[in-house]
Amino acid sequence: MLSVNAYAAPSASEVLVPTTIERRDVGPHDVLIEIKYAGICHSDIHTVRGDWGPQAYPLAPGHEIAGIVTEVGSEVTRHKVGDRVGVGCMVNSCRECANCLAGEEQYCLKGNVGTYGAVDRDGTITQGGYSTHVVVTEDFVVRIPEGIDLDVAAPLLCAGITTYSPLRHWGAGPGKKIAVVGLGGLGHMAVKLAHAMGAEVTVLSQSLKKMEDGLNLGADHYYATSDPATFEKLAGSLDLIINTVSASIEISSYLQLLKLDGALVNVGAPAEPLPVNAFALIGGRRSFAGSMIGGIRETQEMLDFCAEHGLGAEVEVIPAEKINDAYERVLASDVRYRFVIDTSTFA
């Protein structure tokens, strides 16, 4: 076992504190990664605070991991020492079900193994990227292309793939009108990616305070959802809406913005249910759908796409001692647009 420095939550009601955690020895198919940067996702906060159910503590969160391979197992073929690599929201799956065999490990029928707070196949509880090192089976490690710096690459492992996957699945591209609800960690990547795919992009935000940012990121239009005129002006005009917010919104009102056969896809994960009026769906053969991250193959595709188009997250790099402050700022929407921890400060 390898003891490494980390930040972890001792309980649902306590702030994260410095600690040490144990990593397993490197097995034949494992990769040891020296983590350089770890992004802070809203999911980290929900999880460590028990919003999505009870957890095993202490818990080190973090599933936006970018680093360097420092050791590989005897049978590893995909990665070598010195490689720039990333780990996202999952570190294992059954590898045998129909979804896994189709390259959609995130939808493993037996449940994928989350990067933290999950029971791995060996019975241990996984610990995440708020640490200096992690050991992951090679099949769940992706290559970070040279064209992307590691700090701006880290959030792509969650925020990037979470928005890339539905944009690809629902056919974002030239001639398509796409709206992004919320301009935060997920939303800013959705705008960048949809623009790079050639779509006409609209941002729907509570206010216009981030309008200049949205347009600079690639949006063609920007509207305030607090203005009722927005819903009148855009009614029946959109092909696809990506909802990135992790709070309750009036889904039925947004569905009315879709064209015939349009889709509203939820990628945010609020703790409370999102009620839908059936008439908002059947009136235009509209769809209300959900999407969760992406498979390993698609995650690599996303990283290659970002490198090709010069895309990375907009980040604010912080030292470890600022993690708890960053959590409060995330909850207050006071970040543009992703906090990334410099893991060298865990020492």
Image (tube, rainbow, N blue to C red):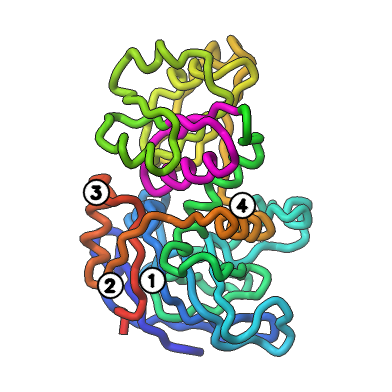
Looking at the rendered structure, the secondary structure element under dot 1 is loop
Asked if residue 147 is positioned above or below residue 346 in the image, the reply reads above
SS assignment at label 3: loop
Q: Which residue is mark 3?
A: 334
Q: Nearer the viewer, mark 3 or mark 2?
A: 3
**Residue at the disc numbered 1:** 130
Which residue is rendered at x = 36% and y = 64% of the image? 340
| On screen, residue 39 above or below 67 | above
- Amino acid found under the numbered disc labelled 1: Tyr
Which amino acid, by three-letter code, is at mark 3?
Asp
| Residue 268 image point, x, y percent | 45, 41
> Which element is circle 4 on?
loop
Marks 2 and 1 in Cβ contact (< 8 Å): yes
Q: Earlier in the sequence, mark 3 or mark 1?
A: 1
Look at the image and say whether residue 72 sits in the magenta stretch: no
At x 64%, y 42%, the residue is 168
